[in-house]
Amino acid sequence: MSHQLAVLVHTPVHSAVVGPLTYVSELPLTAGTLVRVPLGQRELLGVVWDAPLALAPTPLDPQKLRPIASALDGIAPLSARWRQLVTFAANYYQRSVGEVALAALPPQLRDLSTQQWGRRLNRQAKAAGVVEPARIDATESVVLSAEQTGAIAQFNINSGPFLLFGATGSGKTEVYLQCVERLLARAPDAQAMVMVPEINLTPQLEARFRARFGPLYGDSAVVSMHSGMTPAQRLKSWLAAHSGVARIVLGTRMAIFASLPQLKLIIVDEEHDPSYKSGEGARYSARDLAVYRGRLEGAKVMLGSATPSLESWHHSRAVADGGRYLRLVMPSRIGSRTALPAAPGEAARFAPDLAAANAGLPLVRRVDMNHQPKRCVFSPPLLAALVERVARGEQSMVFLNRRGYAPVLHCADCDWKSECPHCSAYRVFHKIDRTLRCHHCGFAERVPRACPACGNPDIAPMGRGTERLEENLAELLADVRRPDSVSEQWPEGEPVRIVRIDADSTKHKGALESQLARVHTGEIDVLVGTQMIAKGHDFRRITLVAAINPDGALFSSDFRAPERLFSLLMQAAGRAGRDADISAVSEMWLQTFHPQHPLFASLKCHDYPTFAAQQLKEREQAGMPPFSFQALVRAEARTQDVAQGFLTAASAAASGMENAAQLLAQLTLYPAVPMSIQRVANVERAQMLIESPSRAALQRFLAAWQAVLHATRKQAAGRGLMRWAIDVDPLAI
């Protein structure tokens, strides 16, 4: 007897196949079973899915259906809750269910043949015969602050979701560890998921969790999931989580789709970080899906940040005002000491906030660059402060969110600039390998000896990136010598040691870990880098952080730019003074041409609530999120006219949909416009914004509009390349 099965395979949203395909099987496989099925000339991994109701009254002819190739034995079916999570994500973010479901599985699982999978199961069975030695409780008792104790108590007696609003250095990670520890001790089969925004933060978090839970539950109880792992490592971690062997899963945004049958706790660290929002494929928000999954699984959810996203902050307002999250507050740093006040002259000159310093947070100094020597990169007061830190044997961090040597090469004679021939952007000058490199399409070539347009040999860099900053700082500190070191490895009188950490200096395997280790051991005096070093790291020896050019985002057309800038600067400031025994006063220096800007005034006081209230007021007046809901439709074609024409035609055709008048009455469809970088790799890009005060109305429109987009694309297919994608709740417009 044969059984008809609905099977999901990886089909992109652009294809005509958007739901499960029907196959036949001799065995009645349950939903969630992993199978291999033929599709065209290929054999693909598929997931047996819940059969659509439409198939029940009209069964298909079994003679026309293809049989499944095999089922993957040894893997328990994916749970109904996992399938519901995938279905919700696909529907909400306007992608096909098969695309989301199969992309959530480890790549090696999709690539292994049935024979290869059988051999792997045999190896796992042999390894399972090795019994780990019994573990003892080797954890040390941790003395918690009153704020940590209160936050944990509130977490235990309430259902959540929770927003843990804690200052940098307030001990949020210890709260996470305590919550996980108590969960695992209370429920023998429970699993927890802890998410971080970026790969480079995973190793240090994994080390802390292994140190705490390895002696209790074994090394296999803690696994990581992120795209930096090899396919074999990802498969091993996924299988450990799916089988329940792994009690704790640490990962980036991709971990939100991990199969954890006994999930009881989800923690999203640095929940404000835009890295939780996917920028390709299904453009999902792992933070938002974490809240949904917690409700689906009956698991508690904790979002943590020193600078929460305005959406989460808005949701954590009082319940009487419509709040949905419970806000847990930890405003004080662990081990903070009262700072000595600055001299009166310095207070008047740089406007530090003494109240913030007394709370143990860095003293914020604003340097007005209008009153400094022209074209100087490091103002004299900042340079003197850096030298002073070196003399005291302390570390400093210089932050500039732009890698490379200079963003543009320029000819003063003919005004030639290093434009990318394939993108509407400039190629960045990288002095270390003498290349001009486009950071959008990757096109690179050697720096020309003379201007390609007029032959002028005097072409010069414009602006600066971290490479140039490192070079400039090395020149300024060339005559400075290190003091006596606590280690004979770095004797007195050595030059100042500067290290740069950005995407270029850490592209080789192990480079980031090696450089961070040098910082932690005190070998480095000054750390120069991009946002990679500005968040999440626990640098115990850094007492001074300097932001060199933070003005770029102050007047951006993107309404989210102030939020991102404030968050980045406050996170960067949080790297200073994390060990109060090293320095009485830690400092954050801001070199700005707009020292009186309200954003810097709030930052000076470390006053996120005031900043958030002001931003939310402006957004409410303008009808911006979180007081409205948005979707961005992006189109790609060979010409800008075709890309914009597709969006314009699809917008016009929306009026012909069923119930169009009712849907369109609750929406605003803005005209199609080029994207900020409108050409990438010789592909023109356009976008159209859709906005509504109702999330439900926006979702109903997008679901109904899918057919219109498909039909419009077919009409434009004869004009060459035509791609489109919908980004629900976009973070960048």
Image (cartoon, helix red, strand yellow):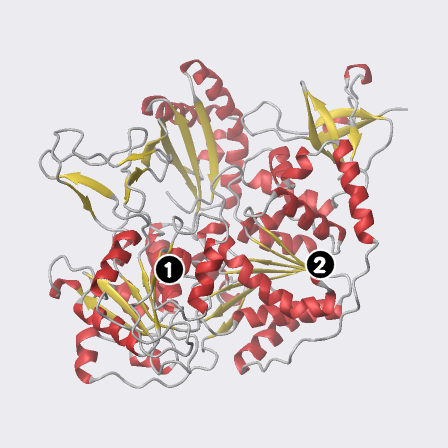
Rendered image quadrant of residue 211 = bottom right
The kind of secondary structure element at disc 1 is helix
Which residue occupies 35% across, 83% down?
584
Find residue 413 and report its horizontal and vertical position in percent: 8, 36
- At label 1, counting other C-alpha atoms closer than 10 Å, the crowd grade (few under 14, some 14-19, many 20 or more) is some
Quarter of the image for the C terminus: give it: top left
- Residue reaching furthest to the right: 1
- For the residues labelled 1 and 2, the Cα–Cα distance comes to 35 Å
The kind of secondary structure element at disc 2 is helix
Rendered image quadrant of residue 572 = bottom left
Which residue occupies 43% across, 58% down?
310
Q: Nearer the viewer, residue 126 or 286?
A: 126
Question: Label 2 belongs to which residue?
Answer: 220
Find residue 217 and report its horizontal and vertical position in percent: 73, 66
Of marks 1 and 2, which one's residue comes earlier in the chain? Answer: 2
Find residue 287 and report its horizontal and vertical position in percent: 54, 53
Q: Tag 1: residue type? A: Leu
Position of 185 compared to 695: left or right?
right
Residue 228 in sight here: yes
Q: Tag 2: residue type? A: Ser
Q: Nearer the viewer, residue 460 or 417?
A: 460
Q: Nearer the viewer, residue 443 or 44?
A: 443
Position of 594 compared to 3: left or right?
left
Question: Label 1 belongs to which residue?
Answer: 568
- At label 2, counting other C-alpha atoms closer than 10 Å, the crowd grade (few under 14, some 14-19, many 20 or more) is some
> Is 63 placed above or below 167 here?
above
